[in-house]
Image (cartoon, rainbow, N blue to C red):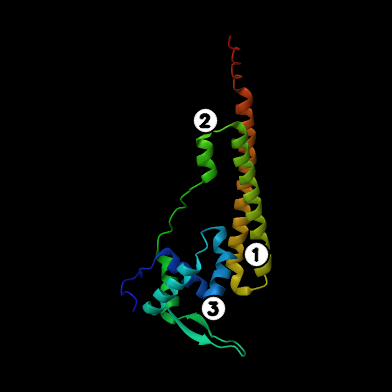
Amino acid sequence: MADETNTPSLPATGWAVLGLLSFGEELSGYDLKKWADRSLRFFYWSPSFSQIYGELRRLEKAGYATSRTLTQEGATRGKRIYRITGEGMEAVRRWAREMPVDPPVLKHGPMLRLWLGHLLEPEQMREVLIRQQEFAEEMRRGAVADAQAAQDEPAWAMPVLTLRWAERYYAAERDLAAAMLDDVEALIAARPPKPVAEPSG
């Protein structure tokens, strides 16, 4: 059963999966993965299937979720679906209300590569920043599409606001990469030209 302390102990992935169940739907592991891909991936991460099923087992053991096998007509095997328990709802509510919010930790691959720009050719630096613009725009569009798809679901009102935050975040990231590309171009233009090697002999 769950810990008797005020703050039950679960890894971040466990809270994320329990949070997905807190919307009240009875969901399969596949459903949870789909929902994570439509929301969590824009601002946290999307757990793998193995992580999801591992956490579901942990949640059941803690008494935070229950499961049953649903066999559909004509199916050769049943589908296991999960539902949050009252104890699980209380635990995730307490966690969301009482636990300190961790500040975001920036692990930015393009920035790290630019930091090592003295080891790159100018065209490589340009390519890193162009790819970052394309990635950010793709993520922005994905957040917009998923917010639009969920906006008619009353239970998803707050996740839709979170997706709008993600939309603005990735728009800003796209624009920052574009501005940095301008800075890189200015830096390249200001460099003195490389000396031309004298012909030998």
Residue that lies at the very extreme toward the bottom in this rendered image? 73
- For the N terminus, the image quarter is bottom left
Disc number lying in front (3 or 1): 3
| 158 vs 189: above or below | below
Q: CA distance from mark 3 to mark 1?
A: 19 Å
> As shown in the figure, which amino acid type bears the numbered disc 2?
His
Picture coordinates of residue 21, whole percent (x, y) = 51, 75
| Secondary structure type for disc 3 | strand
Comparing 134 with 96, the one in front is: 134
Q: Secondary structure at mark 2?
A: helix
Q: Do the numbered discs 2 and 1 sit on residues whose CB atoms are within 8 Å?
A: no
Identify which amino acid the numbered label 1 is placed on.
Asp
Q: Disc 3 to disc 2, how far (Cα)?
A: 50 Å
As helix, strand or loop, the secondary structure at mark 1 comes to helix
Q: Decide if residue 36 is on the left or right side of residue 105.
A: right
Residue 95 shows in the view: yes
Note whether residue 22 is visible: no
| Circle 3 residue | 27
Residue at horizontal 52 percent and vertical 45 percent from the top: 109
